[in-house]
Image (cartoon, coloured by chain):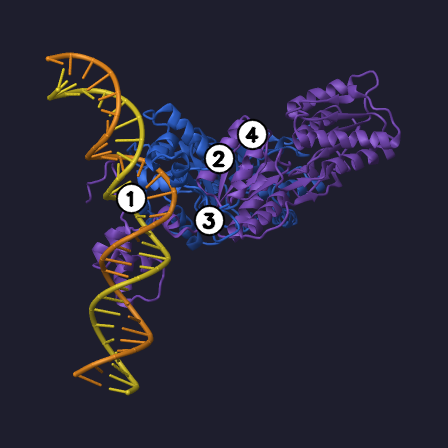
Chain colours: A blue, B purple, C orange, D yellow
Amino acid sequence: MDATASGAFPRRPTMADVARSAGVSLKTVSRVINGVSTVDVAMAARVRDAAGQLGFRANFAASTLRSGSSSATIGLLIKDLSNEFYATIASGVAEVARAHQTQLITAHSGENAEDEMEAIFDLCRRRVDGLLIVPTGGNHSALRSEIDLGIPMVFLDRNPVGLDADSVVIDNYAGARDATLTLISEGHTRIGVLVDTLNMPTMRQRVEGIHAAFAAAGLPWDDTLVSTNVRGPAEASIAVERLLSLSRPPTAFFCGNNRSSIGALRTLWEQRRTEALVAFDDFQLAELMPRPFRVLRYDNRALGTLGAQLLFRRISGEIFDPVTVVLSTELCPRGIQNFQ
Amino acid sequence: MDATASGAFPRRPTMADVARSAGVSLKTVSRVINGVSTVDVAMAARVRDAAGQLGFRANFAASTLRSGSSSATIGLLIKDLSNEFYATIASGVAEVARAHQTQLITAHSGENAEDEMEAIFDLCRRRVDGLLIVPTGGNHSALRSEIDLGIPMVFLDRNPVGLDADSVVIDNYAGARDATLTLISEGHTRIGVLVDTLNMPTMRQRVEGIHAAFAAAGLPWDDTLVSTNVRGPAEASIAVERLLSLSRPPTAFFCGNNRSSIGALRTLWEQRRTEALVAFDDFQLAELMPRPFRVLRYDNRALGTLGAQLLFRRISGEIFDPVTVVLSTELCPRGIQNFQ
DNA sequence: ATCCGACTAGACAACGTTGTCTCAGTGTAT
DNA sequence: ATACACTGAGACAACGTTGTCTAGTCGGAT
């Protein structure tokens, strides 16, 4: 048909093509496509026929550029969609975005703080209506101007650094402290701790909560019972074995996240150990694990839904001081209680 | 500062603003922003200063509109990001998209076939470079013109209806047939089957595979052992209980997906039943379930990665006949083998 | 001194759409 | 018959950017 295109595909039809085909002016096509009622019905039908025939589909970018309307798109910046924690956040965000008839671009923050900023700036160039960011580190003060120029941002799970902005976070400190106090009240005085890198503020807060509980109970703190840089189940297994082999091993374990608790659970089960286990983050099928333990549960999905709701309030133009929503945690029994 | 904007935000600066501020022409700003080398270094520095001062960020939509370059965006249409199956696909797609420096819009197919088409057309209006679709039903022939006009589409998990297009699917038929033959070879002649609605082609294929195995073994097929419309763990529990209470109960169970196998597992564990269980779809922590069973595992993530790779071959202009990639399944032991 | 080419920077138009304005045609009241 | 409001459709410019073309400046060879 049309061989003017350079590639294998014919050029996409524009309103001008539809207008020519229908024998009307370009503006009339625009009116019909946008459902303006001041068009003669017969003419409108002719235009719609021509549009259907040609496979015309209005160019959204051109439309928003001219009309100044919004891109009806928000961005979500996360580390890794294959992680249940982030996937649940994304699912919550997607639900709220959909309710606002907004598309969601999910971008990945990459290896370092620089990549993260580059990803954010790319989304700004695309003129997203707003951004939800699970920050991985670095300083966020360079985002001030973007927010001031109309791209609101809400930070999830961690607060931004060097920037006063909205956020939704978990009460890591109080959760860890209260869970530790519970363990202490049950008679535990030596607690093995498994955490990821302490560079993560969330991990630091959890460890600080444990410290606070020991201090409040007047118990001495033994740093040799802490394993840091536990990144996954395999490292957690090794850490548990190391702690169990100490001359004075812990009588309970505290896992900083769900990935480490899975490794710890496996090792404790395999060795039929009965040490208590408390773990941050609930996870699917936790209740079917082969031994009892407890999780510090919180509403993971709410990080996404509350964050997105906050973001849409900003997008709609509402003005208020930066808000930090803190989600509380709850100690819940998990695993099969009556196993064996 | 600038109070011309209607809302609370100052108008975003454009290249014209940067040009005015730097005392150069608009085109020179364009050159600097795009890294064209034929600009005097001092002048370029002045432009960059002004751009930084104003918080200028090029408008991506205007840029692609004028230059005719691609949107560097692909779309993924799935049912539900909170489902591990879809989340894993999305994660695979995201990884490949990122390697191609492409953003990913994840859209949700909605309740019915009409919503799904509307979502697809919205992404076409946004001129995505290509689409990955996990179809939920309905006829896809209306997408022919979109593909011909330059938006390639790859279908995941299910083939499109009324449209010859690329797809990546799982070998449901052979997987179910072979697993059933294994059960039969172990002496099972009555197998309880739990499947979601048979409107889903994948479910139909799995049931047909089971039928084929019975036919091949010359065994009679008992339709009363099939529970359909098993949507989640709760329905699965009920179905298992019903089947166990039959006068001639099955000696083995076949679950059509991971959600039903979780419910079945729980009920079988709670009642300490030793019936064999084979289930389609592997899932996280399956190996820590409190009883042995087997899963029909396949490379879930490959649905996303292979699909996206296929899509990017199309996007790069490669021309080939529509391809259907079939992923094979594998029967794997899961659950704790030596439980009490 | 003159010419040429190399190199920069600006003017202008265009991408596909929509906001604004104008104008032709119709109907109605004077 | 004239003035008037009203309806519907086209002309034109503009959104923010980039491709193309032109013009100016400079250094060096004639």
Q: Nearer the viewer, residue C14 or A71?
A: C14
Chain hosting mark 1? A
Q: Which residue is mark 3?
A: B72
Q: Tag on residue A149?
A: 1
The amino acid type of the residue labelled 4 equals Cys
Disc 1 with disc 3 on a shared chain: no
Q: Earlier in the sequence, mark 4 or mark 1?
A: 1
Q: Nearer the viewer, mark 4 or mark 3?
A: 3
Amino acid type at mark 2: Gln
For the residues labelled 1 and 3, the Cα–Cα distance comes to: 24 Å
SS at badge 1 = loop
* Callout 1–callout 3 Cβ contact below 8 Å: no
Residue A332, label in figure: 4
**Chain hosting mark 2:** A
Which of B93 and A18 lies nearest the eye of the viewer?
A18
The CA span between labels 4 and 3 is 45 Å
Look at mark 2 in the image and give the residue it sits on: A53
Amino acid found under the numbered disc labelled 1: Leu
Q: Nearer the viewer, mark 2 or mark 4?
A: 2
Asked if the residue at tag 2 contacts the one at tag 3, i.e. Cβ–Cβ closer than 8 Å, the answer is no
- For the residues marked 2 and 1, what is the alpha-carbon distance in whole angstroms? 42 Å
Q: CA distance from mark 3 to mark 2?
A: 28 Å
Q: Is residue B285 above or below residue A224?
A: above
In this rendering, position of residue B189 left or right of residue D3 = right
Marks 2 and 4 belong to one chain:
yes
